[in-house]
Image (cartoon, rainbow, N blue to C red):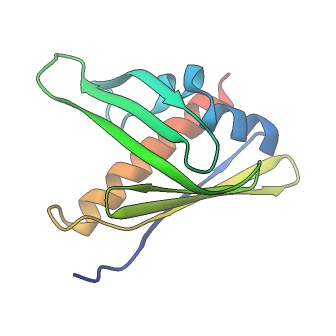
Amino acid sequence: MNLEKITVQATINADSQKVWNFYTNPEHITKWNFADPSWHCPFAENNMNIGGKYLARMEAKDGSYGFDFEAVYTNIVHKQQFTYNFGERYATVKFNKTNNQTEVIIQFGPESENPIELQKNGWQAILNNFKIYTESN
């Protein structure tokens, strides 16, 4: 099945070095990597090298459901963009700096089990959490 790519984006009121650090450092990832306040990210690890693994545990706070999001890096341009594969899918995350802001653009291949709009809204909600967390810390 050939599905179109999904794109989400946000402009963060912070310089690109801070944005890159908050997006890639596990101590920060656990603070923003969830789509809904009833969820959390209790654990994350990140080996930012080609072939390195990204792992984030996402769980409902009530313990009713959880899953590991695992990916392997295939391309990294330090502080500018990276691509990782997860299963048969991929995501590319770009960090474009403009003055004292950084635009984060994520493009990913959708899965076929859930509607495109649901997937886009979920990834956008996580990115919105990232924006709020980064701007307030």
Residue 57 sits in quarter = top left
Total number of numbered discs in the rendering: 0
Task: Report the residue at 11% width, 23% height from top.
Answer: 64
Residue 58 position in % (x across, y down): 31, 30
Task: Report the residue at 29% width, 58% height from top.
Answer: 119
Front residue of 91/75: it is 75
Reply above or below: 22 against 123: above
Quadrant where the C terminus sits is top right
- Looking at the image, the residue that sits furthest to the right is 99
Task: Report the residue at 17% width, 16% height from top.
Answer: 62
Front residue of 39/71: it is 71
Residue 96 position in % (x across, y down): 75, 59
- Looking at the image, the residue that sits furthest to the left is 64
Front residue of 59/132: it is 59
Reply above or below: 126 against 3: above
Residue 100 position in % (x across, y down): 85, 46
Reply above or below: 82 against 24: below
Quadrant where the N terminus sits is bottom left
Front residue of 131/114: it is 114
Residue 117 sits in quarter = bottom left
Please indicate whether residue 42 sits to the left or right of residue 74 in the image.
left
Please indicate whether residue 132 sits to the left or right of residue 88 in the image.
right
